[in-house]
Image: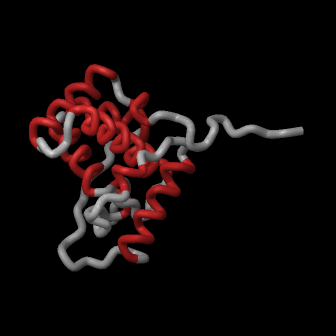
Amino acid sequence: MTIAPERPVGTTDPAALVDPELRERLAARIAQDHPENDTPTARRIVGQTAAFLAAGARAPGQFLVPSPLVDIGWHTWILHTLEYEEFCRRVAGRFIHHIPTDEGEPVPGGPVEARERTLAAITAAGYTIDVDLWMGEDHDCSQCHSGCTDSPK
């Protein structure tokens, strides 16, 4: 007898977590505020932000960190407070706080291990990873404490 997971790992597009109209509004805002990202890239950022948040909700206390591009998506989404709160309640059952680390505050395991931990959590949650958005030039993104979900700070 074979037991299959409820959702095949790594096959779900995380953009499906976001209402299409909201996804377009967030992508337009990202492209406007960060013109180095065109609208198709901004849509990908929204999807990976949704994956990061959903994975963090399932892995509290693991110290997950967004990539610089995913952090842009998160900051943009937070500006849309009503929609952000609704998303958090739907995917996490609670509000997901964004709590930056202080400058010089160490990241458990270092930034490379934190990124690996984050990508493993996203994969384990069943979402596809858009590698290009996670492997940019800036590999030292460590803005968030405990995955910005259940921060003890």
Taking the view exactly as shown, the residue that stands out farthest to the right is: 1
The colour scheme used here is secondary structure
Determine the residue positioned at 57% across, 50% down: 124
For the residue pair 24 and 5, the one nearer the viewer reads as 24
Residue at 26% in and 51% down:
69
Q: Residue at x 32, y 64 (%)?
A: 145
- Residue depicted at x 16% and y 37%: 31
Above or below for 20 versus 124: above
> Is 139 positioned to the left or the right of 9 in the image?
left
User: How many numbered tags mark residues here?
Assistant: 0
Q: Position of residue 111 (x, y in %)?
A: 36, 71
- Quarter of the figure with residue 150: bottom left
Residue 44 lies in what quarter of the image? top left
Residue 29 position, x and y percent, is 15, 34
Q: Is residue 5 left or right of residue 129?
A: right
Q: Residue 19 location in percent, x, y? A: 34, 23
Q: Position of residue 88 (x, y in %)?
A: 35, 38
Closest to the observer, 82 or 113: 113
Q: Quadrant of the C terminus?
A: bottom left
Measured along the vertical axis of the image, is residue 48 above or below residue 80? below
Q: Is residue 21 visible?
A: yes
User: As drawn, which residue projects farthest toward the top?
Assistant: 21
Q: Examine the rendering and report whether any part of residue 153 can be seen.
A: no
Q: Quadrant of residue 14?
A: top left
The quadrant of the picture occupied by the N terminus is top right
